[in-house]
Image: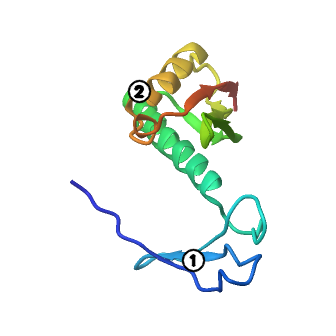
Amino acid sequence: MHAYPLSLRWTGDTSQPPFTRAATASTDGKPDLALSSGMGDGADLSRWNPEDLLGASLAQCHLLTFLALAAKTQLKVLSYEDRVSVELDTLDKVTRVTRIVLSPTITVAAGTDHDKVVVMFEKAHKYCFIANSITAQVAMFPNVIDG
């Protein structure tokens, strides 16, 4: 088992609306992460919010898993740039993340089998531990191009 400890700090006054939603996440050896909410009174949209972080976590996990599979199957990937969208909806009076869309452009060496790249991209979803930890639908639209 692996553990990843962190600290979350918030100070403010909830009796004085709109109170700040700004918080800071920190852990040893890493820069602090400025956090807030994504919407509502007191939100600071210049800071990362839970929706951003969930999308980034899924996208990064998928990328790392895909790169490992690409290396294992000798696919020469030159770059990967993902456009991620996290969608919230209210179902049964509960707001939840219902869909996350991954839309990467994957640049490969000329002559690389694009179909094999897409197969490895889709297989990465099966092995991505973040994808296996969430209930939201994950839609994937890879675009493979030659570099």
Q: Where in the figure is residue 132, as x and y percent of width and height?
A: 40, 35
Is residue 74 visible in this depiction of the protein? Answer: no
Name which residue lies at 60% across and 17% down. Answer: 114
Query: Could you classify mark 1 by the number of other residues whose Cα lies within 10 Å: few (under 14), some (14-19), or many (20 or more)?
Result: some
Which numbered mark, 1 or 2, is in the foreground of this view? 1
Dot 2: element: helix
Coloration mode: rainbow
From the viewer's perspective, tell me whether residue 13 is left or right of residue 123. right
Q: Residue at x 57, y 77 (%)?
A: 24
Residue 118 position by quadrant:
top right
Residue situated in front as seen by the camera: 105 or 31: 31
Rendered image: mark on residue 127? none
Residue, disc 1: 24
> Where in the figure is residue 10, as x and y percent of width and height?
57, 81
Tags 1 and 2 touching, CB below 8 Å? no
Q: Is residue 27 above or below residue 134?
A: below
Say if 117 sits above or below 63 in the image. Answer: above
Q: Residue furthest left?
A: 1
Say which element carries label 1. strand
What quarter of the picture does the C terminus occupy? top right
**Is 36 placed above or below 107 here?**
below
